[in-house]
Image (cartoon, rainbow, N blue to C red):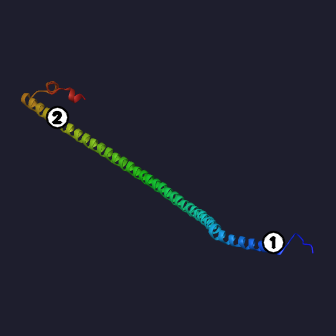
Amino acid sequence: MSRLFNLDFQLLHDSGIVLISVFFLFLILSNKLFNPVRKMLDDRKNKIKGELENAASDQEEAKKLREEYEAKLAAANKEAEEILQEARKKAQLNEERILKEAKEEASQIRKRAFEEAKLEQSRVQDEIKQQMITVAAAMAAKVVASKIDTTVQDELVNETLKEMDGSTWQD
C-alpha cells in the first residue's frame, strides 16, 4: 500500500505531540502574556471611557456654570439698571425740590422787598406829614406873629419853603 503524503504512525504521533505542546504553550502564553495585555487594553479602554465620561460631566458642569454666570451677569445688569433708574428718580425729585425751594425763596424775597417798599413808603409819607406839620406850625406862628394880609402871608409861605428846602415840596 502506498501512502498518501507519507503519513505514518510516527508522523501522526509527532504531530499530535506538537499540537498538544502548541495547545499547552498557547494556554501558558495566554495566561502569562495575553491576559496581561488584554487586562492592560481593558484598563486603557476603561480609563479612556472614564476620561470621556469625566470630560462630558465637566462639559455639562461648565455649561451649567456658564448659564449661572450669564444669569448672574443678567441679574447684575438688571440691578445696575435699577440702581441707575433709582438714582435718576432721586435726582429728578431733588431737582424738583430745589426748584420749588428756589421759587419759594424768590417769592419770599419779593414779598419782603414789597413789604420793605411799603414800609419805606409809609415812613416817607410820615416824614412828609411831619414836615408839613412843621411848615404849617411855622407859618401859623409867623402869621399870628405878624397879623398881616395875604400878600405878606404868601411871601412868608415862600420864605418858609425856602427855609425848609422847597425842592421837597415840588417833587
Q: Residue at x 6, y 29 (%)?
A: 145
Residue designated by label 1:
11
Frontmost residue, 21 versus 51? 21
Q: Earlier in the sequence, mark 2 or mark 1?
A: 1
User: In which quarter of the view is residue 106 placed?
Assistant: top left
Disc 2: which residue: 132
Name the amino acid, label 2: Met
Rendered location of residue 143, percent (x, y): 10, 30
| Quarter of the figure with residue 162 | top left
Would you say 6 lies left or right of 22 here?
right
Quadrant placement of the N terminus:
bottom right
What kind of residue is marked 1?
Leu
Identify whether 2 is placed above or below 109.
below
**Left or right relative to 83: residue 65:** right
95 versus 63 height, above or below: above
Question: Looking at the figure, which quarter contains the C terminus?
Answer: top left
Q: Residue at x 35, y 46 (%)?
A: 103
Please, is residue 87 above or below residue 142 in the view? Answer: below
